[in-house]
Image (cartoon, rainbow, N blue to C red):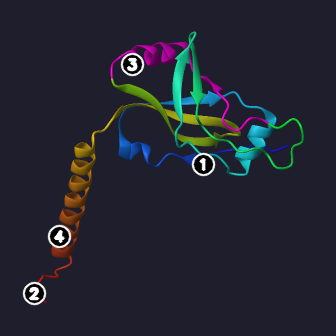
Amino acid sequence: MVKEVGRKLVAQNKKARHDYSIEDVYECGLVLTGTEVKSLRLGRASLIDGFAMIQDGELWLSGVHIPEYTEATWTNHTPRRDRKLLVHKDELARLVAKSKEGGLTLIPLTLYFKDGKAKIELAVARGKKSHDKRAALLEREMGREAEREVSRRRSGKSEGR
């Protein structure tokens, strides 16, 4: 049997980068049941409202929705159950230290398969205020405008033509 190679994206939390300023990113493994893996292989998952927490020295993922596998019978899983995350001890110690800081939270960014194993990208993030979001949008728009102007000048086109 041929082993899967590469990275296959399943779900992405696009709103996370808008709502939070990302400070650090960690790759974690997931403890899943068989029907959860089959549902993920079909590309069905939602990271919206997901977050991670540390309980009793273990890292748990909560609020992530993996829908039930339609072909399964009574062995199906609960869609929004808490799932254990697998990280190295030193990474867990760093996450514990950072989570004790005020205003920081652990949020999932992407869910994917890497060489056949389900992985999740977990970010240590700080929530943005609405004025920070507006400033980020304005800064991005100004950058685009500057790029357009540089491109226009390189091509030799001017406003008056």
Q: What element does badge 3 sit on?
A: helix
Magenta segment? 77-102
Instruction: List the residue tagged with mark 3.
Output: 98
Task: Identify residue for label 2.
Answer: 160
Marks 3 and 2, how far apart in space? 55 Å
Which of pointers 3 and 4 lies earlier in the amino acid sequence? 3
Distance Cα–Cα, label 4 vs label 1:
35 Å
Instruction: Name the amino acid type tagged 1.
Output: Leu
Q: Which residue is mark 1?
A: 9
Q: Disc 4 marks which residue?
A: 149
Q: Secondary structure at mark 1?
A: strand
x and y percentages locating residue 160 in the rendered image: 9, 87
- Give neighbour class at mark 3: few <14, some 14-19, many 20+ (Cα, 10 Å): some
Q: Quadrant of residue 35?
A: top right
Q: Which amino acid is tagged 3?
A: Lys
Q: Are marks 1 and 3 in contact (CB under 8 Å)?
A: no
Q: In the displayed orientation, state which residue is furthest to the left.
A: 160
The x, y position of residue 94, in whole percent, is 44, 16
Q: Earlier in the sequence, mark 4 or mark 2?
A: 4
Q: Earlier in the sequence, mark 3 or mark 2?
A: 3
Closer to the camera in the image, 90 or 65:
65
Q: Amino acid at mark 4?
A: Glu
